[in-house]
Amino acid sequence: MIFDEIAEAVVQGDAEKAVMLAKKIVEEKLDLNEAIINGLNKGMRKVGELYEKREYFLPEIIVAADALYEALEIFKPHLLTDREHKATVVCGVVRGDIHDIGKNIVKLFLEASGYKVIDLGRNVQSELFVEAVKEHDANVLALSTLMSPTLDSMREVLDLLEKEGLSDKLIVIIGGAATDEKFAKEIGAIYLEDANAAIKYLNAQFSGGIT
Amino acid sequence: MELLQKNADILDGLMAKPGSTVPTFPIILGYSINEYHKHTGIPAPQIMKDGKKIAEAQIYVAHRFNIPFVITIIDLNVIGEAFGATLTYLPDVIPVHETPAIEDLEGIDKIEPKDPAKDGRMPQVIKAAKVFGQSFSSEGELCFGGCEGPITAAGSVWGVENLMRNMIKNPDLVHKLLEACTDTIIDFCNAQIEAGVQAIGLAEPTASSTCISPQFFKEFAFPYLKKITRKVNSPAFLLHICGESQNLVKLVSKIPNILIFSVDQINLRVAKEVIGKKFLILLGNVSTGIMRRGTPAEVEAAAKECLKEGAPGGKFILSTGCDIAPGTPPENIDMLLRVGKRFGKYG
């Protein structure tokens, strides 16, 4: 099955093969949404599982992601309408911190799993998170930091959300080396250890579509 | 071992001599810059760009907490910056990496080592080594020079994502970059030794198993670490790898002249079993998160757990898993030191 083959090409990080298969899928006029969900996403989920088991590490994830993005580029002109998204996620690295590899991996996993992701980048001012949540009517805010000093920036974002009355309907997830469950509880957020945990958690929240 | 002979207390503790105690000190790099900035009002960028002030910051914190250890190296972008990476200098803490020195494959292909006497902040770090040599080492303190390890340096030069992608796609180019970084590190560390430090610490977090596989460690980190420990004129080395390192212990124990392995996410007891009779000291591994946000009681519990797992038989320094964060409460640092003294007694 060609969808399994393209999934495997992602797992192997074989961009050339993924592109070749993507072109074939387009030529044969197969359902592209199916190809994304049961091909590319499935491959990336497998990559996540392999990282969790420490069979894969960052180099393997990055190369798999390259293959996924290159195949997506082939599909893009042929996707008639936007795919239906499970939810909208605003993400970024909080003010004072520029370590963004973890955030980029989470973003990739979210996109590959059918979420619309608004990426604000790194060293993001707290107010910008709040504005983006409002502007995009986001369901989830994902904050990241590697460093301990910038945990205070995370707290600041949560305080601002509270002030603006946005806390109730918004799920705030946090991650990164400096964060943990205890801190998440303190500020009223959900701590998730890595990209795979984020997908699992959010899929459980949005399995029935957005309410 | 000659490194440790000046300080009999530390040596006895490492040999688990009856009546001695487990040597104890947290890893203090960036914390010293933030504390010295708060103490003197000097902006952090000015401290970072002046070797004399770096040394003063280290000595200030060492004296305040009575810690027998200072080191010249504060941040892990010294080599990257020397190659042309840009950093953002923050007002009160250490600078952070902004853009890589080189983005394209051709640039890596043409790369040449840098000169410690003139490139980036290397001359300032050497100046810090000189200050330590003149004013500090006589008292029996451990006085280290240092540098980021080759993989960490290469990540700063090329960008971590590029580096990792090309470990798979263009391993030859990665080796080329690692050669250039390694040769720079060797010259840089030798210059620090000549300036007066006793030994060298290498920080290699990007080679941890949180980032790359043990197989890639063996392929891309191991040969260059070996080259560094062979060519740098230091009697011993400390290797710091924060993140996961359980599956690296065996390999690290095979790198000649590594005396201290500073570890973070690891089971100390299992690591000691792997090390066996070899004289490799483990240093670790109270979480820096607990140090920063925990109570003294939580620090006490975590430190006691480390003692339980790491101290039996000696070859252990009670410390933190990584550089303690700026803003860590002083009472937590005092508590760590107190636990070592009070509960780390060898019978």
Image (cartoon, coloured by chain):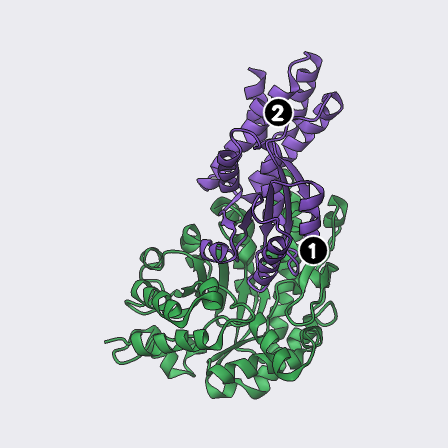
Quarter residue A123 falls in: bottom right
Q: Residue at x 59, y 29 (%)?
A: A10
Is there any visible trace of residue A123 in the rendered image? Answer: no
Task: Examine the image and state in which quarter residue A31 appears.
Answer: top right
Reply above or below: A81 against B70: above
- Residue B133 got which mark? none
Q: Residue at 46%, 59% (x, y): give it.
A: B255
In the image, B12 versus A143, the foreground residue is A143
Check if mark 1's residue and mark 2's residue have beta carbons within 8 Å: no
The three-letter amino acid code for the residue at tag 2 is: Ile
User: Which is nearer the eye, B226 or B335?
Assistant: B335
Quick check: A155 above or below B106?
Answer: below
Badge 2 is on which residue?
Answer: A36
Instruction: Left or right? Give the position of B131 relative to B89.
Output: left
Q: Residues within 10 Å of mark 1 (few under 14, many from 20)?
A: few
Image quarter where the C terminus of chain A lies is top right
Mark 1 and mark 2 lie on one chain; the one further toward the N terminus is: 2
Of the chain colours in the picture, the one used for chain B is: green
- Chain whose colour in the figure is purple: A
* Coordinates of residue B86 in the picture (x, y in percent): 74, 60
Under tag 2, what secondary structure?
helix
Q: The residue marked by circle 2 belongs to what chain?
A: A
Residue at 55%, 15% in the rendered image: A1
- Residue B338: percent from the left, percent from the top? 37, 78
**Residue A127: which numbered mark, if any?**
1
